[in-house]
């Protein structure tokens, strides 16, 4: 198992070396854009884009709404490294592969990670189009990406997850929301494997254990980011309502439509937030 971790470091170094060979940028802020949210990349003054397929050992995004590019540039004057499209356990990737780009970001010098995702609401007070700041998560339903031998160059064996989402960044985001009339919810994200949307009984269980929204990403990325000593902020776009009176069928197309409709609010929030991060 130790040999496999040494192989991981070899792969990470090869990925980083390639990226550095084609792009000299050294941003401190990394962004991961989820389903239907990739258009934020169009707000970046692009210095360089790299297709995932060109980076050694990088997974390839297979989901509609994920563009599959690394974008280096400036967002509202701040140097950023954005992933336009992420990877999911349900695509057949291992937890280590899902979180691989986060480790690449760390080795490239990223210190703060901003994550977004599309999620279904189980909190009855939420509506489609709401933005929810994630202040905690439940990951029991997702395989932990740190299972296996620990590589000390990446982080400690037992990372503390008592505060995975940075409170100072959350407070800064809430102030931005107030200043720009962006209604921001705040709550708990529950990560599940997918690719099926949840049954009514599963939605009720998630609500009972304290979840406000549920989605198929993010938690494995956050665990690896905390393991690597990064600061994390994350926000969910509510794209469907899990607990509902009718029996409407949820489709991925509807999720993308809802995410696209809510994207201007998220774009404004992140554009203002990156400026706060460098002050």
Image (tube, rainbow, N blue to C red):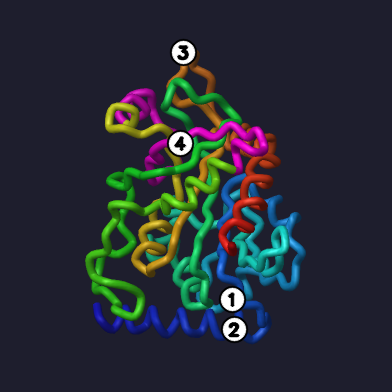
**Mark 4 or mark 2, which is nearer the start of the sequence?**
2
Residue wearing tag 3:
245
Q: CA distance from mark 1 to mark 3?
A: 46 Å
Q: CA distance from mark 2 to mark 4?
A: 38 Å
Q: CA distance from mark 2 to mark 3?
A: 51 Å
Q: Residue at x 63, y 43 (%)?
A: 266
Residue wearing tag 2:
18
**Mark 3 or mark 2, which is nearer the start of the sequence?**
2
Q: Is residue 61 in sight in this rendering?
A: no
Q: Position of residue 218 (x, y in %)?
A: 45, 51
Q: CA distance from mark 4 to mark 3?
A: 24 Å
Label 2 close to label 1 by CB (< 8 Å): yes
Q: Position of residue 252 (x, y in %)?
A: 58, 37
Q: Residue at x 41, y 57 (%)?
A: 222
Label 1 close to label 4 by CB (< 8 Å): no
Say few, some or many: other residues with alpha carbon within 10 Å of mark 2 (under 14 / 14 to 19 / 20 or more).
Answer: some
**Mark 3 or mark 1, which is nearer the start of the sequence?**
1
On residue 186, the disc is 4
Say few, some or many: other residues with alpha carbon within 10 Å of mark 4 (under 14 / 14 to 19 / 20 or more).
Answer: some
Residue wearing tag 1:
55
Figure check: 225 above or below 40: below
Give the structural element (helix, strand or loop) at label 2: helix
Label 1 close to label 3 by CB (< 8 Å): no
Image side of residue 174 versus residue 193, left or right: right
Give the structural element (helix, strand or loop) at label 3: loop
**Mark 1 or mark 2, which is nearer the start of the sequence?**
2
**Quarter of the figure that contains the C terminus:** bottom right
Give the structural element (helix, strand or loop) at label 1: loop
Q: Position of residue 123 (x, y in %)?
A: 42, 26
**Mark 3 or mark 4, which is nearer the start of the sequence?**
4
């Amino acid at each position: 198992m130790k040999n496999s971790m040494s192989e991981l470091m070899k792969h990470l170094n090869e990925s980083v070396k390639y990226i550095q060979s084609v792009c000299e940028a050294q941003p401190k802020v990394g962004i991961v854009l989820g389903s239907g949210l990739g258009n934020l990349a169009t707000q970046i003054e692009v210095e360089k884009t790299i297709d995932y397929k060109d980076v050694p050992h990088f997974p390839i995004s297979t989901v509609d709404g994920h563009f599959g590019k690394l974008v280096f540039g400036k967002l509202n004057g701040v140097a950023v490294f954005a992933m336009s499209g992420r990877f999911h356990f349900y695509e057949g990737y291992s937890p280590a592969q899902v979180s691989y780009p986060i480790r690449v970001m760390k080795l490239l010098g990223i210190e703060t990670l901003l994550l977004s995702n599309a999620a279904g609401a189980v909190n009855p007070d939420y509506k489609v189009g709401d933005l929810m700041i994630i202040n905690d998560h439940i990951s029991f339903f997702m395989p932990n990406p740190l299972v296996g031998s620990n590589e000390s160059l990446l982080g400690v064996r037992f990372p503390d997850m008592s505060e995975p989402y940075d409170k100072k960044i959350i407070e800064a985001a809430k102030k931005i929301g107030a200043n720009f009339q962006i209604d921001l919810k705040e709550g708990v994200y529950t990560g599940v494997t997918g690719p099926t949307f949840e049954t009514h009984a599963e939605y009720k269980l998630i609500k009972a254990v304290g979840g406000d929204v549920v989605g198929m990403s993010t938690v494995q990325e956050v665990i690896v980011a905390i393991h690597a000593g990064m600061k994390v902020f994350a926000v969910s776009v509510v794209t469907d309502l899990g607990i509902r009176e009718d029996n409407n069928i949820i489709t991925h197309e509807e999720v993308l439509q809802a995410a696209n409709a809510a994207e201007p609010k998220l774009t404004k929030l992140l554009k203002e937030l990156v400026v706060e991060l460098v002050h």
